[in-house]
């Protein structure tokens, strides 16, 4: 495996070459989505720098349909609330984008976030209330996925999605 990069190296590169935020890789991603992954040690400051260098980036989906918000919702990081807030502020419409298999960011948060909170769910639902009733291509809504993947669902955690879509 490659040696770890010094902290802040993507931000230093971006400061030196702002145009580096624009090219796509072979997967159709701009630098912002990989910058959201845990191995890059994402920070709200790095995301802000990437968005400032290329403002359309938060709304760009790669060839699999993943936007940066989808990727952040898959991340296991203590910075999740700050990263989510930064991306929703930059492009709230990303909360309504379904990737190629029909998963919206809310589906992915319900599946992958081990520290899922009512506040995180409320932020995603406020950006796109219809996500609560959106089935993925397998027919599962976010509540179904949460029931499958969250070891200890509580009434408090379920209150936000159920209020947004009572028949779920």
Image (tube, rainbow, N blue to C red):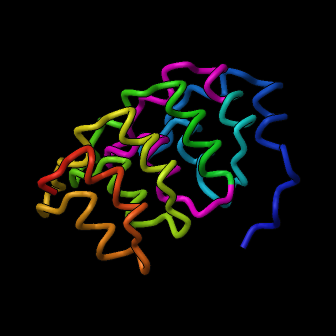
Residue sitting nearer the eye, 165 or 28 = 165
Q: Is residue 76 above or below residue 13?
A: below
Q: Is residue 97 above or below residue 117?
A: above
**Extent of the magenta region:** 50-78
Q: Quadrant of the C terminus?
A: bottom left
x and y percent of residue 136 in the render? 18, 55
Residue 11 falls within the magenta-colored stretch = no
Residue 165 shown left or right of residue 44 in the figure: left
x and y percent of residue 13 in the render? 80, 34
Residue at 43%, 50% (x, y): give it: 121
Residue sitting nearer the eye, 95 or 161 = 161
Residue at 34%, 55% (x, y): give it: 159
Q: As drawn, which residue projects farthest toward the right? A: 6
Residue at 52%, 50% (x, y): give it: 72
Residue 74 falls within the magenta-colored stretch = yes
x and y percent of residue 8 in the render? 84, 44
Residue at 27%, 58% (x, y): give it: 142
Q: Is residue 102 above or below residue 116?
A: above
Residue 132 shown left or right of residue 18 in the figure: left
Residue sitting nearer the eye, 21 or 158 = 158
Residue 129 shown left or right of residue 136 in the figure: right
x and y percent of residue 78 in the render? 68, 58
């Amino acid at each position: 495996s490659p040696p770890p990069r010094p902290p802040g190296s993507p931000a230093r590169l971006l400061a030196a070459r702002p145009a580096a935020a624009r090219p796509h890789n072979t997967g159709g991603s701009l630098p912002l989505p990989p910058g959201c992954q845990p191995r890059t040690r994402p920070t709200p400051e790095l995301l802000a720098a990437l968005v400032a260098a290329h403002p359309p980036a938060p709304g760009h989906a790669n060839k699999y349909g993943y936007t940066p918000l989808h990727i952040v919702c898959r991340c296991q990081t203590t910075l999740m609330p700050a990263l989510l807030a930064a991306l929703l502020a930059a492009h709230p419409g990303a909360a309504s984008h379904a990737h190629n298999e029909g998963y919206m960011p809310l589906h992915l948060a319900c599946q992958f976030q081990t520290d899922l909170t009512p506040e995180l769910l409320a932020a995603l639902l406020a950006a796109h209330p219809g996500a609560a009733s959106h089935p993925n291509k397998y027919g599962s809504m976010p509540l179904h996925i949460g029931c499958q993947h969250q070891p200890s669902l509580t009434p408090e955690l379920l209150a936000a999605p159920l209020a947004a879509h009572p028949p779920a």
